[in-house]
Amino acid sequence: MSDVPPDAPRQPAQLVEHFFRHETGRLHGALLRLLGVHNLALAEDVAQEAMLRALRTWSMGGVPPNPSAWITQVAMNLAKDHLRRQRMSAGKEAAIITHHEQTIARPAPAWETAHEIRDDTLRLMFVCCHPAVASDAQVVLALKMICGFSTAEIARAFLSSEAAIEKQLTRTKQRIHEAGIAFEIPEGEDLAPRLNGVLAALYLLFNEGYKASSGDRLLREELSHEAIRLMAVLLAHPAGRTPRAHALLALMLLTAARFPSRLDEHGALLRLHDQDRSKWDRGLIEQGLLHLVAAAEGDDLSEYHLQAGIAAIHCTATDYAATDWARILRHYDELYRLRPSPVVALNRAVVVAHLHGPQAALDALAQITGRDRLESHYLLHAVAGELHWRLKDERAAAASFRRALALAHVGPEQAYLTRMLERALDDDTPLSA
Amino acid sequence: MSAPNPPTPSAPFLLFFRNSGPETHAHLSPDQRQQLVTRWNAWFEGLVAEGKATEGQPLELETRLVSGPGGARVTDGPFPEAKEAIGGYVKLMVSGLDEATAIAQRHPGLAYGLIIEVRQMTPTCHLGVNTKPNEASDVIVHPS
């Protein structure tokens, strides 16, 4: 057209997937470096303001060639405006803020290096996973601050209400404020325990995504992928590059590799036995095995090592029948010594069933220490139901599946248990007729 | 890819975007925001490719209202009613009010509360377009 001006907008730059989400996390890091951890809420507000500005301007004017630099510049200017306003409105604090501006590192330029971004993200991880914060609160805070999830998304992922998540976040931020946590990568003897805290939180985050869920399965799988992304950030830094971290990432990769086969085409849960192994992600398995090799350096043998070892045995078995159950049982025995929890014992019982039959497994279930803590978990009853069924005790099987069904919360698990219950009842029909 | 231009003469229209301020999109998740940016740009780029959009621009939110003889009254924005503020505009060259309205109706922002005002620019002759003078063409597309 003749009257298209020569400076008509060109095709806007394309944004990579989850750009806004990850950019939010990156901004939080850069802003906390400028503002300090005690200004966590302000950093969040500024990041939010910058993101909304980007949304408006890029919608109508196109995405700029370097969107990340654009948004950092906007956020840094907003932050400095806020500091200036704070200084003007509270005269007596002026000295503090001036001191603050002088001592805190220089404002981040728009052209930050990959190293600085990585280090900010790592510092942010150490803040969110600080021992002063309860572990489930750490995961929620990390999702908000580092992964850039909205409160609504977190609520959906945790089957909670937005108000409840908001309340928890407010309390957590208050805790962080009171604890006076520094924006730093811990050093010396502080490092190892703090690092363990970060690993534990990322493990929890991964597991949240791994759990089957109704409706928002994709959103939950994103939690697992975020955990993997953050593990990669951690391992990219010398301070975080430990055998234990390699083991945890191996565990995550070897587990995520099996995500594509976990559900059938109707979204129903498939047991390992029924999964199509050709759907397993070979690339992730290879990466996982490489990290498992790196995890073997040194003499640390953590629960992550053992769990990754178990996952590796499953991933490398050509089919279900070829699974090396004896080796898996040895791993579980070791794991139970390290972490004697009823959940580990329950998983161990499933392996016992493969090696020594359903009755041996039922005996193992009966002997679990602290079994009462498992009573309210559907999995105990689902496993017991399966074992009873294999012993041809359909009535006991049906009773167990009924209890499991009453305790299961999410769709695919409920559907699976309903199928199992129907199977037990079908077999039961000729007997009771 | 694009449909051949209709043989009807083109007339200039402006689409004004209202209710596009921060408060409209604050509740969207980062991924929803990104999707909106992407779809919004695709809407505009599609029109450019068809030769129907000639320019578009966001406007800064900072507003000043000048009134009174000699501009004696200067009021700082933003507007008391944030919905009223114009956040940006797009200039179209289309066959008429109906086509301009149809284009506005396809806007992805409507789902999130965007309000689009469709206005024909006063008749000009440089394109050989003859529209009836004094006919106020004014349609407002509200979110459905």
Image (spheres, rainbow, N blue to C red):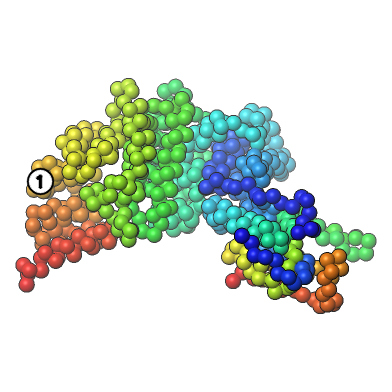
Q: Quadrant of residue B138?
A: bottom right
Q: Position of residue A387 (x, y in %)?
A: 13, 52
Q: Between A377 and B135, which is closer to the camera in this rendering?
A: B135
Q: Quadrant of residue A89?
A: top right
Taking the image as shown, residue B40 lies to the left or right of residue A363, namely right
Taking the image as shown, residue B21 lies to the left or right of residue B68, namely left
Q: Position of residue A61 (x, y in %)?
A: 69, 52
Q: Residue at x 73, y 57 (%)?
A: B56
The amino acid pointed to by label 1 is: Gly
Q: Residue at x 23, y 52 (%)?
A: A274
Q: Position of residue B125 (x, y in %)?
A: 87, 68
Tally of marks: 1
Quick one: label 1, few (<14), some, or many (20+) residues within 10 Å? some
Asked if residue B21 shows in the view, the reply is: no
Q: Residue at x 47, y 43 (%)?
A: A142
Q: Position of residue A59 (x, y in %)?
A: 65, 55
Q: Is residue A189 above or below residue A344?
A: above
The residue labelled by disc 1 is: A357
Q: Quadrant of residue B27?
A: bottom right
Taking the image as shown, residue A113 lies to the left or right of residue A209, namely right
What is the quadrant of the C terminus of chain A in the image?
bottom left
- Under circle 1, the secondary element is loop
Instruction: Tell me the chain of label 1.
Output: A
Taking the image as shown, residue A40 lies to the left or right of residue A203, namely right
Q: Between A135 and A347, which is closer to the camera in this rendering?
A: A347
Q: Residue at x 13, y 45 (%)?
A: A353
Q: Is residue B12 above or below residue B30?
A: below
What is the quadrant of the N terminus of chain A in the image?
bottom right
